[in-house]
Image (tube, rainbow, N blue to C red):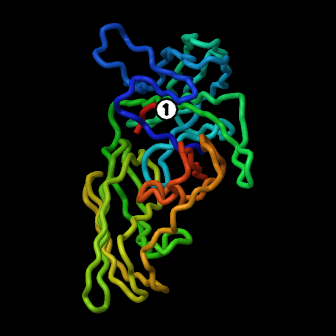
Amino acid sequence: MALSFLPSAPAQASLADGFGVRPVVPRGADTPPAYFELEVKPGQVLTRSVVTSNGSKKPMTYRIDSVDGLSGQTSGVVYANRQDVRKEAGDWIEVDSKAVTLAPGATKRLRFTVRVPKNVRNGDHLAGIAFEDTETSSTKSKFSVKQVIRVVMGVQFKIKGGKPAQVALNSVKLQPLADLQVPSAVLRIGNRGDKLCKPKVRVTLTSASGKETVSENQLDTLLAHDKISYPLTFKGALEAGEYEAKADVTECGDPQSLTTRATLKDDLTGDLPPATTPSVTTIKESSGLPLWAAILIAVGGALTGVNLLLWAQRRRGRPDASA
């Protein structure tokens, strides 16, 4: 499932290769949005349009699919692959065209229809319209990566009513971050409400000697009725031993706290691996990118030699357009 970050400022989702897509909005709108935000009712049918464009000097053909929106492993939004079964709002959208071909410098308007189920849950739902380049390429090096360009236009549905967002804190586990020497507390958290939210997490570790180590972070979007295992990293070294771990989650309904005993089996230096320069050009979408690679980019950019436009994977199964 391709990781898709959602920009708040640009009015068009686009890539350097020249393909772009933007919502068609009513005339007179002050600032064209980067994604659709639709207030709908159960059983409602409506149509909307997007404008695609080709700013390159070569023709382009993109496949079009509706997909479900999901919570990413480290919060934020990811969109399912086009091959995945649509279990949520992605199944409400039907695009008029299964593909679009654009000549250099051309634009084309495309329509899609939304059919909201009659027995739908009230609250927030998220889907996406995915545009995937039919041409793929691979790097010519020992580390071969298949490159795929995919742009997703987010479609957020708001149905009046529903329970407010409410975080649930289920467990806290102390462990190294993947195979690295970076300590982390993995929080299993979910959103039991019908509205999306952005929780804030804080973990305090107290050693047997009374020394406290604290880490906190503001998460991105957690979708309604979704769960993630969030790895909250700590700066610096952490000695092996028994700790009291106190976790607090706020800003998503009523605050939640959990105190437990946590064991760290080995000393952790807190060091990231040295920066390297792999012989890779650009990863635009790759299958099976390990979680630690995505986290490294977020916490320090240790892979300085890689120009990553990251589309990471999430197995399961904030609404804006992805670029």
The answer to whether residue 204 is visible is yes
**Corner quadrant of residue 12:** top left
Q: Left or right: 254 with respect to 8?
A: left
Residue at image position (58%, 48%) is 317
Residue at image position (55%, 14%) is 111
Image spot of residue 149 (x, y percent): 62, 34
Q: Nearer the viewer, residue 7 or 121?
A: 7
Residue farthest toward the bottom in the current orientation of the protein: 209
Image spot of residue 55 (x, y percent): 55, 18
Residue at image position (36%, 19%) is 32
Quadrant into which the N terminus falls: top right
Query: So how many labels did they put on this image?
Result: 1
Helix, strand or loop under label 1: loop
Sort mark 1 into few (<14), some (14-19) or many (20+) by Cα contacts within 10 Å: few
Residue 98, above or below 293:
above
Q: Which residue is mark 1?
A: 119
Residue 156, above or below 73:
above
Image spot of residue 195 (x, y percent): 36, 42
The answer to whether residue 316 is visible is no
Amino acid at circle 1: Asn
Image spot of residue 169 (x, y percent): 37, 63
Residue at image position (59%, 58%) is 290
Residue 111, above or below 239:
above
Q: Nearer the viewer, residue 137 or 312?
A: 137
